[in-house]
Amino acid sequence: MLALAVIMAILFAWALVAGRFARWSITAPLAMVAAGIALTSGPHPVFNIELEGFFTERTVSIVLALFLFIDATEVPTRIWRRERAVLGRMLGIALPLAFLLAILSGLALFHAKHFWSLAVLATIAIPTDLAPAATLTRDRRIPQRLRDILNVESGLNDGLVAPVFLFCLAAAQAQEKGDIPLRALADAVPGFLIAVVVGAVIGTGCARGLTAAWSHGWTQPSALRLGVGAVPLITYGLAVSLHGNGFVAAFVAGAFFGPAARRIPDDALHLTEDVTELLSYVVWFVFGEVVTDLFDHRFDLLVIAYGLLAVTVIRVAPVMLSLIGSGIRTRDAAFLGWLGPRGLASIVFGLLAFIGLPSPDNDFVGDATVATVFISVVLHGLSYGPIAARYGRGQQLAGT
């Protein structure tokens, strides 16, 4: 309980100075990582978090389910319709290309590793999350169109990667046991179908139920917010109980819930968003412990090289290739490729892989996850300001 109190105290302290820290692009995730590193490092750390425990696995799984649900509900339909050609290229062409390039990079750097372990790592390395660069979405120097595209793309790509991650993880586990890895695909298909059905039914049914209750005056705003918060948890729990994919179910539930719940107040999702954000900070704090482990015991230059490739070439090249002929200027395509911070999805996938894979593959994937996210936090944090300033100067020149 002391750990919980300290984590919340750190978050409270950040809340007091969030406005000032925003001037230097210091967000809550960055503050929590720094606190995690400070309190878990040294010969006598203040905290020693058990990463492979059942509680940690369940906690990060629930956080990711909530995160995927919120992401799916927040995709603006109007932006998707307006930018479907560009978003279709980024999600349908760039994302698979990035996955393939991540696997090839892994094969080139880590010859002794199994293919499926490298495939797991690829699914960890490619999802993007704008939370570590939250100020970007509000910076008016960046053209609104580019911010909208990044928001929608980052909200969808982790949900699309989640089932691929779970399949690759199952295949890697099967390979370790001497089973046929591709059998994991056959085993995963029923779970995927169960998840889609559960997510669609729960998401649509709950949205219609809450809409009817609100329209007839049967509920209150606070109760409505609690009802919305229960939807992803019901979906995840039911899907897992039926041997389905809980992450896919939560994402599908959000995708169906959003359009069907347009008549309830816009702030009905705020409680779920705030709880998800709060829990995500705990995950960022835990990530600080993993960073400490990497730099204390297993500093591998090849792992660092993979992290650098993941946040640069593996992201930028596929995006720029996919946008050729789309009408997006080369400079803007480069911006969309570069601004792909790695965040909560990568951390949770990495923690689940660390828990689910045998040694030494779990240490390898954990180290590469830490390197990728940590390098992303540093590079994107340092580069965002100059890029925004350059766009700002361009707007000034255009206005003169």
Image: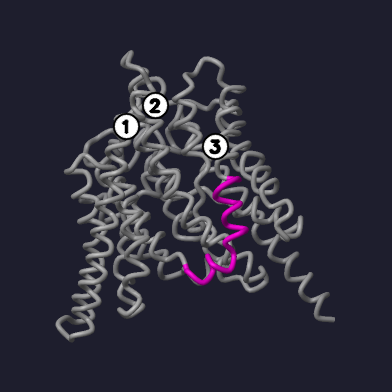
Closer-to-camera residue (367/110): 110
Task: Answer few, some or many: residues within 10 Å of disc 1's Cα (few below 14, many 20 plus, some between 14 and 19).
Answer: some
Question: Of the numbered discs in the image, which one, if any, rests on residue 99?
Answer: 3
Q: Which three-letter amino acid code belongs to the residue tagged 1?
A: Ile
Comparing marks 2 and 3, which lies closer to the viewer? 3
Name the N-terminal-most of marks 1 and 3.
3
Where does residue 395 sit, x and y in percent of width and height?
76, 74
Task: Answer few, some or many: residues within 10 Å of disc 3's Cα (few below 14, many 20 plus, some between 14 and 19).
Answer: many
- From the image, give the main secondary structure of the stretch colored magenta: helix
Residue at point 57%, 66% (across, down): 148
Question: Of the numbered discs in the image, which one, if any, rests on residue 355?
Answer: 1
Q: Secondary structure at mark 1?
A: helix
Closer-to-camera residue (210/65): 210
Q: Which residue is mark 2?
A: 362
Q: Which three-letter amino acid code belongs to the residue tagged 2?
A: Asn
- Tell me the CA gap for discs 2 and 1: 7 Å
- Tell me the CA gap for discs 1 and 3: 22 Å
Using the rendered image of the protein, determine whether residue 295 is visible from the camera's viewpoint. Answer: no
The way the protein has been coloured in the rendering is one colour
Asked whether, in this view, residue 160 is left or right of residue 218, the answer is right
Asked whether, in this view, residue 340 is left or right of residue 211, the answer is right
